Image (cartoon, helix red, strand yellow):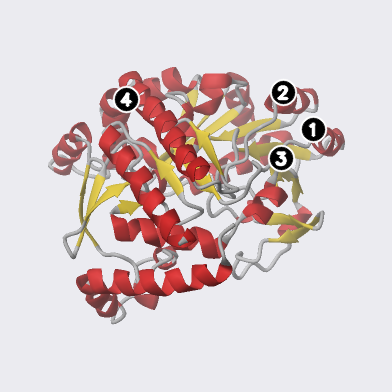
Amino acid sequence: MIDRNRIATCRAEEEARFIAANPKSADAALDRKRGWHQGVPFHWMRDWPSPFPLTAKTAHGSTLTTLDGQVLDDFCLGDTASMFGHSPEPLALALAQQAQEGLSYMLPSQKAANVGLMLASRFHHPHWQLTTTASEANRAAIRWARGITGRDKILIFNGCYHGAVDDVFVDLRDGLPETRRSLVGQVWDVREHTIAIEFNDGRALEAALEAGDIAAVLAEPVMTNCGMVLPRPGFLALMREATARTGTLLIWDETHTISSGPGGHSGSYGPAGDMFVIGKSIGGGVPCAAFGFSHEVATRMEAYRATLPPGHSGIGTTLSANALAISAMHAMLDDVMSPHAYSHMLGLGQMLAGRIEGVIDRHQLPWHVSSVGARVEIVCAPKPPTNGTEARAAMDHDLESLIHLMLVNRGTLLAPFHNMMLVSPVTTVEQVGRLADHLDDAVSALLS
């Protein structure tokens, strides 16, 4: 076990090392305070476990260069937005060309037809709509599900993450639902319309659905934001059967689990849902997301629309499906998110997990590694969690944040939340080896 006093000592040492190595980032952080609230363009940029956020200068492929000239092996990759590498050449060329032709028309561009067919072919849903973020796509899917079923409730899983959608900010504490404490300024009780249960609890799932008042189950096939929680054998098949039997729509949010394979986790392993949400990586970092749905859902949507007055539906924004986003998705789906790219990513993801397990075993630590294809995570607990409550209990913020800081100081960047890593098509074997070496060095320092 890691001595808690040693954690405090190491943190002081590593923070001093970080400050000494990043004077320009420190100055930039002070400069930003003159214009930005809390010194950052958006508040989550303060969530890095370092004395101040690094300031990025450039990023190419699988490396990120800071304002101080440090070149970091980047396993954060924009927390999935750049999962296929920073500025891949086909994307950069497509964006440069589109910049000369206009960025937003409020009309479909010529590439739109191809992008629709690409989405349908890859993700096996015939009908698609675009938004600017996965949060918006999830919100739209929930709204449509409520509209076409005539039911007002949705079901989610404790510890889930589906972006900034108010309806999903419900957690279980000691088995009781409570509004997530991070839901700022919400004035109505979302628990009136949101049911939260534990992931992998088939009995709770069937009992909740039997009431017949739930419009949709919104879920990731693998929970990824409270640590990784993998489904027990048969649980996803049960979810599909129970939703179909009770007239409930099944919405897969695959914004993170696109790491599993070219068609996401459901495309690789099944089962298919009624609706499918994908965001972040599909634009290579350009804000865009998509939600797809079956013929049956499309027919019900059209019937519902026929009862409404013409005009704005209250779903989507002016920038949804803008020409720049369409070009970005066209380049990513056509040239970047290829089977060859996935072959490299999945193989290297297995290698990364194995190298980290080797470090854990060598130091006889009560930790484990979780992985979902190209997504890998270090968990400072001995047993993989089976639900959100267990995942929450397994988190050790002090230790996890210190490991993150120690790896940054040694040249490796992980995601700032629970030490998640992504492998891109341009990540190298050498970078994987360096990450393992840096982790080994950090653990040795912690245990010394």
Question: What residue is at 14 percent from the left and 37 percent from the top?
Answer: 97
Foreground of the two, 338 or 410: 410
- Label 1: which residue? 202
Mark 4 neighbour class, 10 Å CA radius: few under 14, some 14 to 19, many 20 or more = some
Q: CA distance from mark 3 to mark 2?
A: 12 Å
Which numbered marker is on residue 117? none
* Residue placed furthest toward the bottom: 34
Question: What residue is at 44 percent from the left and 63 percent from the top?
Answer: 44
| Image position, residue 35 (x, y; %) | 29, 78
Q: Earlier in the sequence, mark 4 or mark 3?
A: 3
Q: Is disc 4 placed on a helix, strand or loop?
A: helix
- Work out which quarter of the rendered image holds the C terminus and state it: bottom left
Q: Taking 428 as reference, is 315 left or right? A: right
Q: Earlier in the sequence, mark 4 or mark 1?
A: 1
Mark 1 neighbour class, 10 Å CA radius: few under 14, some 14 to 19, many 20 or more = some
- Label 4: which residue? 341
- Amino acid type shown at disc 2: Gly
Foreground of the two, 234 or 170: 234
- Label 3: which residue? 199
Q: Are marks 1 and 2 in contact (CB under 8 Å)?
A: yes
| Image position, residue 299 (x, y; %) | 61, 23
Q: CA distance from mark 4 to mark 1?
A: 35 Å
Mark 2 neighbour class, 10 Å CA radius: few under 14, some 14 to 19, many 20 or more = few
Vertical placement of 134 versus 268: above or below?
A: below
- Amino acid type shown at disc 1: Gly
Q: Taking 407 as reference, is 313 left or right? A: right
- Work out which quarter of the rendered image holds the N terminus and state it: bottom right
Q: CA distance from mark 4 to mark 2?
A: 29 Å
| Image position, residue 277 (x, y; %) | 51, 35
- Label 2: which residue? 234
Q: Taking 144 as reference, is 346 left or right? A: left
- Amino acid type shown at disc 4: Ala
